Image (cartoon, rainbow, N blue to C red):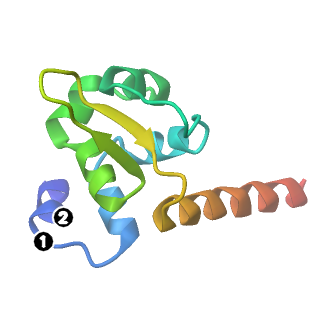
């Protein structure tokens, strides 16, 4: 219910945008580890992220991440849609910086 309400309204912050898609955090975490030179199908991204393909398909997670600029979506008529990591985007850079900062913090706490 909350999830539907979050999508009906325009998100005002990046975190609320991500929070409104159940599979988004796992997919973003996966994107940070994938080769940006490669192209991936929905099935491959689903398997890599450990998120059910049905979830990604039904809630539009991958399309949303493409609209955010962290994924590049390549559609070719008659072919399966492919996705690539948008490693040069500002959103990807922010996600990578956040990931690095958390890793560093966890490492220094030990």
Q: Quadrant of the N terminus?
A: bottom left
What residue is shown at x 24% (from left), y 72% (from top)? Answer: 11
Cα–Cα span, label 2 and label 1: 6 Å
Question: Residue 19 lies in what quarter of the image?
Answer: bottom left
Decide which of 64, 106 is in the foreground and name it. 64
Question: Residue 33 lies in what quarter of the image?
Answer: top right
Q: Secondary structure at mark 2?
A: helix
Q: Is residue 32 left or right of residue 64?
A: right
Labels in figure, total: 2
Residue 51 placed where, x, y %? 37, 29
Q: Is residue 100 left or right of residue 89?
A: right
Decide which of 77, 68 is in the foreground and name it. 77
Crowd rating for badge 2 (residues with CA inside 10 Å; few <14, some 14–19, many 20+): some
Vertical side of 2 occupied by 25: above or below: above
Decide which of 53, 78 is in the foreground and name it. 78
What residue is shown at x 75% (from left), y 54% (from top)? Answer: 103
Residue 108 placed where, x, y %? 89, 60
Residue 70 placed where, x, y %? 42, 54
Vertical side of 56 occupied by 12: above or below: below
What residue is shown at x 58% (from left), y 45% (from top)? Answer: 32
Name the residue beneath numbered marker 1.
9
């Amino acid at each position: 219910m909350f999830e539907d309400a979050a999508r009906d309204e325009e998100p005002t912050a990046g975190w609320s945008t991500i929070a409104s898609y159940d599979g988004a955090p796992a997919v973003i975490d996966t994107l940070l580890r994938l080769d940006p030179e490669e192209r991936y199908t929905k099935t491959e991204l689903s398997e890599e992220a450990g998120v059910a393909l049905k979830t990604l398909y039904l809630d539009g997670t991958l399309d949303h991440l493409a609209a955010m600029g962290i994924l590049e979506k390549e559609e070719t008529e008659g072919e399966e849609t492919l996705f690539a990591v948008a490693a040069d985007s500002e959103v990807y850079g922010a996600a990578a910086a956040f990931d690095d900062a958390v890793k560093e913090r966890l490492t220094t706490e030990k």
